[in-house]
Amino acid sequence: MAVLRIFANALIMAAEIAAVIGVAAFGFHYPFIFAAVTAGLSFVLGLNLETARLRYELPFYFGGLIKPSLVLTGLVGFVEALFKGVLAGVAALFTFSGTNTDRLFWVAVLFGVCIYAGAGALRLLSMRGEALPMRWGYFRLAPLLGLLFSAGVALLAAAAVIPPADVADIGWKIIFELPPQPSIEQVSELFFQIKQAFDDFIVTVLSAVMDEQWARIAGILVSVNVLSGFVIALYAALIATGVRRAEDALL
């Protein structure tokens, strides 16, 4: 039995790693389809989760003044799920769309690392505190994983793995290289460079009033890269849910 348990554990772990690599590879190779799938998953899963949350949340805020009827919770849940779905889809598209293949490869690697870390955290919370991975991941994990992803991008940029942004180069591309009707890949690549330049600008400004290390930390907190956490948390929650169900069934 012990041998079977070890084998089942190894099988589950291998499946988890394969799922993480598969999601990152999907985004890297098919960014547009990945963005559409992400938006659809976020919306469909959010419909049920947002409605369930509102049934508990509305009485907390309004007491007996508002009864959480199916119509009210359904309508508000639909709007919130739709908003988060659109946000997740746009974030997924700008995360993986671009023209610099080397940069996108390292972004995909970082994306996968963050998903694996998020799934591991959800699994631990589920085992130690009986947290529900899908609910906790959908509602609570996005900011933390967004910060982790933002810090990873900053680290890759500092190590020159990702090309640093150059304001003069950005201006040159906008004026002389960008076609009248640019593709989404070209816009995404330019948007990424503008994000990098904005992050560098924030760090430079804050460095005038605080220590440079604290300025870099503040730059990570306000970076647009944090929005990728909505995408990472979604897949981390799905993978963690699958892992926990497999463990319950096989172990």
Image (cartoon, rainbow, N blue to C red):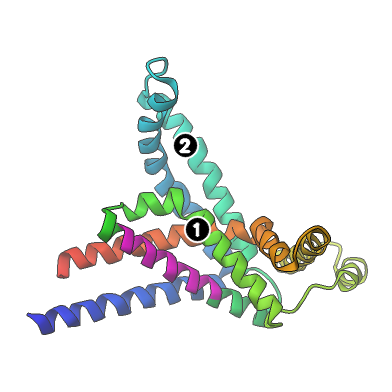
Q: Looking at the picture, which amino acid does disc 2 mark?
A: Phe
Measuring from the top left, give residue 241's x and y in whole percent: 31, 60
Q: Is residue 85 left or right of residue 196?
A: left
Picture quadrant of residue 238: bottom left
- Tell whether position 188 is magenta: no
Q: Residue at x 46, y 55 (%)?
A: 141
- Quadrant of the rendering where the C terminus is positioned: bottom left
Residue 214: assigned label: none
Name the residue beneath numbered marker 1. Answer: 38
Tell me where the magenta segment starts and ends, as one range. Answer: 110-125
Q: Quadrant of residue 146?
A: bottom right
The residue drawn where x is 40% and y is 49% is 45
In the image, 89 versus 250, the foreground residue is 250
Neighbourhood count class around disc 1 (C-alpha, 10 Å): few under 14, some 14–19, many 20 upward:
many
Left or right: where 71 falls relative to 209:
left
Checking the image for residue 78, the label placed there is: 2
Q: Is residue 59 above or below residue 97?
A: above
What residue lies at 60% left-to-right and 56% top-to-bottom? 227
